[in-house]
């Protein structure tokens, strides 16, 4: 890869509303080019920091990094729009995506579909990036986890008096680990009598 190639792609991406065709190994080649020019510049600066070559290499790396940033920003915006259009039912050609961009596209598409489902249908879809939320982390209006029978895994920090929940008696001592209904477990966590260790 050369500076001229990076400049040409940056200019083309800036002018086009569609993705510009780039080589399959574009991002690895771009990284290798920038690292190579940096190394050459550092070597030249060690030899003669005031030489025209050192100055030229420093300018090249600065401009190349700026153009690389433009390319990435423009392409990411276009890919996000592609994912949104696909989620709305459009059939798009994904042939101009690099491997890294295809992964990004797939992730964005999954999140857009989940967001559309939540906003338009009121249905929450889990994605591979969804982080499970503990019932104890949700501010309770009434008793936490009472609806849906959520359970929480706790470790007791103290002996807990026997209690009944969901028709079952629980006898828990210090350091006991147990699944208990969130309506009880979250209260024990809040009172400092237990710690949540999972769901």
Image (spheres, helix red, strand yellow):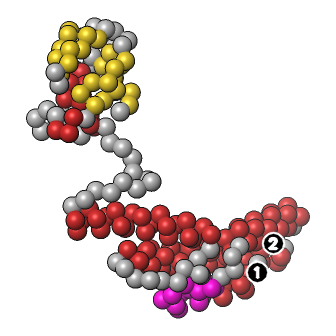
Are the two marked residues, 1 and 2, in contact with CB atoms closer than 8 angstroms?
no
Going from N to C along the chain, the mark reached first, 1 or 2, is 1
> Viewed as shown, does residue 143 lie left or right of 3?
left
Quarter of the image with the N terminus is bottom right
Q: Is residue 195 above or below residue 160?
A: below
Q: Residue at x 16, y 38 (%)?
A: 147
Q: Secondary structure at mark 2?
A: helix
Disc 2: which residue: 54
Q: Secondary structure at mark 1?
A: loop
> Viewed as shown, does residue 119 lie left or right of 95?
left
Foreground residue among 158 and 5:
158
Q: Residue at x 59, y 81 (%)?
A: 95
Q: Quadrant of residue 44?
A: bottom right
Disc assigned to residue 2:
1
Magenta-tinted stretch: 9-21
Q: Is residue 161 above or below residue 92?
A: above
Q: Residue at x 81, y 72 (%)?
A: 54
Q: Extreme front residue here?
A: 167
């Amino acid at each position: 890869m050369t500076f001229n190639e990076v400049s040409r792609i940056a200019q083309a991406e800036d002018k086009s509303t569609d993705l510009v065709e780039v080589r399959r190994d574009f991002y690895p080649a771009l990284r290798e080019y920038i690292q190579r020019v940096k190394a050459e510049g550092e070597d030249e600066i060690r030899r003669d920091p005031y030489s025209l070559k050192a100055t030229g290499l420093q300018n090249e790396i600065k401009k190349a990094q700026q153009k690389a940033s433009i390319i990435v920003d423009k392409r990411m915006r276009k890919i996000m729009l592609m994912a949104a259009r696909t989620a709305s039912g459009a059939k798009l050609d994904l042939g101009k995506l690099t491997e890294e961009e295809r992964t990004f596209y797939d992730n964005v598409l999954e999140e857009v579909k989940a967001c559309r489902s939540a906003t338009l249908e009121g249905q929450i879809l889990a994605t591979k990036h969804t982080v499970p939320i503990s019932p104890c982390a949700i501010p309770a209006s009434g008793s936490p986890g009472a609806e849906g029978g959520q359970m929480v895994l706790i470790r007791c920090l103290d002996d807990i008096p026997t209690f009944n929940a969901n028709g079952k008696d629980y006898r828990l001592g210090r350091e006991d680990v147990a699944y208990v209904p969130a309506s009880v477990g979250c209260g024990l966590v809040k009172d400092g009598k237990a710690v949540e260790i999972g769901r």
